[in-house]
Amino acid sequence: MSACRSRILMLVVAAPLLLGAVPRPCRAQQAGVPSPDPALLARANRLLSQVPVIDGHNDLPSELLDRFGGDPLAAHLDRGQPALETDLPRLKAGHVGAQFWSAYVENDSIPAGASLRVALRQIDMVHRMVDAYPAALAPARTAADIERIEAEGRTASLIGVEGGHAIEGSLSALRMLYDLGVRYMTLTHNTTLPWADAALDYPRRHGLTPFGVDVIHEMNRLGMFADLSHVSAEVMRDVLRATRAPVIFSHSSARALVDHPRNVPDDVLRLMPANGGVVMVNFCPCFTGKGAELWDARVDSALQAAKAGAASPEQAQAAFRAWMRTHPRPIATVSDIADHIDHVVKLAGIDHVGVGGDYDGTGGDLPVGMPDVSSYPVLFAELLRRGYTDEQLKKIAGLNLLRAMRQMEAVAAQLQKTERPLLTDLAPKASAQ
């Protein structure tokens, strides 16, 4: 789940009567968007039929739990589900050969002591979703699985746990999550943990603690990507020093273009070639739209001003909505997403970029012209227009992730010959602080 959607939820909590006051401009503005050049779009579709699109992050499991009672059949994903941004026909149209489904662990599960339980519920949702549609989806745990399943015409389904609080300070829990099919863990979500700082929280650790290093080393030994989306820049650098295997950013963009803490700084991008990892560019306008970081700061002031100057909640609501009409949330276009890919390629190289669309995780905040998972050919048509070669685009689509995953698996196989499971765990009280 992106910080955009989390932000909408925080605004709603701060001012319940403002529910719905924060618009979702991208949904409203999809109509009338100029179509890409038909010849380039046809070429992009031909290219993507030759190589799987491997997307780093999709929050459909959370949507199924929240909106369909956790029943994947009730969502009718096989028929098309217009209430969602992801369904089986649109995965096919978007040439998505492999998807990391997010097992999102809410931050409020931390004080409740329920993070592992929430993670298991989300993982179970992924398993049940895949089992419900065996003609279109199949479970995958390795790079070889991805290639085999994609060749069968199905979408390889992998699991990424979003939020390291899921393990509750226990490497034993980490190992059990691996056994359940988890192949990446986002080290934090938006809350700083006892062993790692989050990008959107106060930096209490200033990087990784010794236990945090143990988490990385055990992930290396198991064969699980360390996902650096959502962590602070200090943690990014510490992980890159500690890891023996490639890392990923499952859904992050370039900070030089949009100065958001969730995006990747230039110095970290320059470290990626030595690591072998992949930055999977996020599509959400809050990370890619020009001026998004300035709007984010101004909306807080506008909300507080509306509340302070009103005699009633209704007046505050009206004042805030009036401000929103004259200060709409910045949008992102397909060109903006391509700009972030260009920047990652410039600093990290063509071998270290991929896509992490964050569909069904942004509260409807999406790039204009890219409303759902069928939209990948539109992006690749834009990249073709910019002069990328077919071989370069195949790397961006999925070959870079496959290469990094094979490398990660090879490191794990070697480490398992020489290292035993790490036994360090945080005390229960420490793991919740």
Image (cartoon, helix red, strand yellow):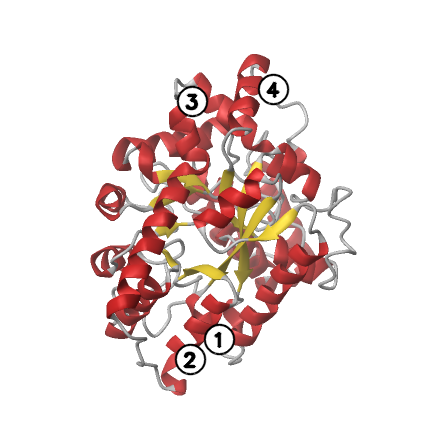
Q: Position of residue 95 (x, y in %)?
A: 58, 34
Residue 170 visible? The answer is no
CA–CA distance between discs 1 and 4? 45 Å
Tell us which disc is closer to us: 3 or 4.
3
Name the mark nearer the viewer: 3 or 1. 3
- Residue 75: numbered disc: none
Q: Secondary structure at mark 1?
A: loop
Q: Which residue is mark 3?
A: 390
- What residue is shown with label 2? 432
Q: Which residue is tagged 4?
A: 35
User: Which image quarter holds the C terminus?
Assistant: bottom left
Real-space Cα distance between discs 2 and 4?
A: 49 Å
Q: CA distance from mark 2 to mark 1?
A: 6 Å
Q: Quadrant of residue 364?
A: top right
Measure the C-alpha gap from mark 3 to mark 4.
Answer: 21 Å
Front residue (pair 410, 198): 410
Label 4 environment density (alpha carbons within 10 Å; few <14, some 14–19, many ≥20): few
Q: Amino acid at mark 1?
A: Ile
For the residues bearing labels 2 and 1, Cβ distance under 8 angstroms? yes
Residue at the image position 57 percent from the left and 58 percent from the top: 11
Instruction: Give the residue pinned by disc 1.
Output: 110
Q: Earlier in the sequence, mark 2 or mark 1?
A: 1
The type of residue carrying mark 4 is: Ser
- N-term-proximal mark, 3 vs 4: 4
Q: Secondary structure at mark 3?
A: helix
- Please tell me whether mark 4 sits on a helix, a strand or a loop: loop
- Whether 43 is drawn above or below 334: the answer is above
Which three-letter amino acid code belongs to the residue tagged 2? Ala
**At x 36% / y 83%, what residue is drawn?**
430
